[in-house]
Amino acid sequence: MDKTIQQLLDLSDRIYGLQDARLYDLGDLFYYHQKWLLRYIDDKKNQRLDKSVEKLLVSLAWYFAIISSFGIDLQKMLEIRYSYKCPFCLGIPCDCQKNKKRQSQKTGRPVSGNPKDLINWQKVIGKIYPNESTEFRNLEILRHQDIFHQSFRRFRQASGKKNMHEIEIACVDYFVELLKVANNLEIDLATEFSKFFSNGCFVCHKSPCECFYSE
Ligand SMILES: [Zn+2]
Ligand SMILES: [Zn+2]
């Protein structure tokens, strides 16, 4: 079987988990994720394709660090929310642009796509959300990154009862946005990620990483 999301999270955690816990707080993790995402967009805009994919992978590793620190089950959340439908309009392909209102609905639709590996989730997401231009996607990913970030700020700042489910939804909705980017680039995200981190950290080539990275 192809790589599962958990296997990618584990790979990322083996290389960076210890350093993340020692060096960074949640704000740092978001900062680095966003920084590498912007580097990806910059390289993509300037047609540096290979470089742009590498930046996206580093950005994804920082995203995984956020997911790991909150113990989010992405696979479970994908199954709940994206099993062959857009959770907002319930369409395949998605019809949200026409409907305008973006509020998720309950569905009686039977589950028809429930893969266990990431490449097949990419395909499911490609069926729900086909045909977006790269430029549009790169603007959209920044907007969604902001929504993702805000939901964590709300969670941390809320006094009294904290809504963990809102965080889970923010994580999976944003992950789907990242999968749309991967589809747009026509890359197999799991394979590229495993290859890029196959020798440990992409800078120091150690696992766990010994970079003590700070910027
Ligand atoms: Zn939709
Ligand atoms: Zn390193």
Image (cartoon, rainbow, N blue to C red):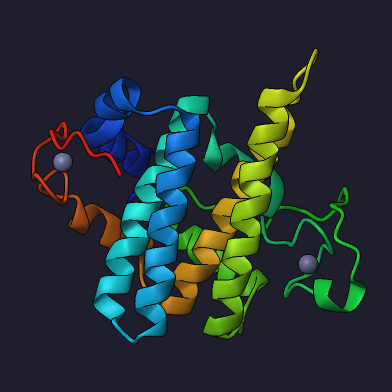
Q: Position of residue 27 (x, y in %)?
A: 50, 34
- Residue at x 47% of width, y 61% of height: 120
Q: Position of residue 87 (x, y in %)?
A: 77, 56
- Can residue 57 be seen in this snapshot? yes
Q: Is residue 52 above or below residue 209?
A: below
- Residue at x 76% of width, y 25% of height: 163
Q: Is residue 211 left or right of residue 28?
A: left
- Residue at x 19% of width, y 58% of height: 195
Q: Position of residue 200 (x, y in %)?
A: 14, 43
Q: Is residue 132 above or below residue 114?
A: below
- In the rendered image, which quarter is residue 204 located in? top left
- Residue at x 40% of width, y 36% of height: 65
In front of the other: 181 or 127: 181
In which quadrant is the C terminus drawn? Answer: top left
Looking at the rendering, the quadrant in which ligand 2 lies is top left
Q: Is residue 30 left or right of residue 36?
A: right
Q: Is residue 95 above or below residue 85?
A: below
- In the rendered image, which quarter is residue 159 located in? top right
In front of the other: 205 or 45: 45
Q: Is residue 113 above or below residue 27?
A: below
- Can residue 78 be seen in this snapshot? no
In front of the other: 157 or 161: 157
Q: Is residue 197 left or right of residue 8?
A: left
Q: Tag count in the figure?
A: 0
Residue at the extreme front: 215
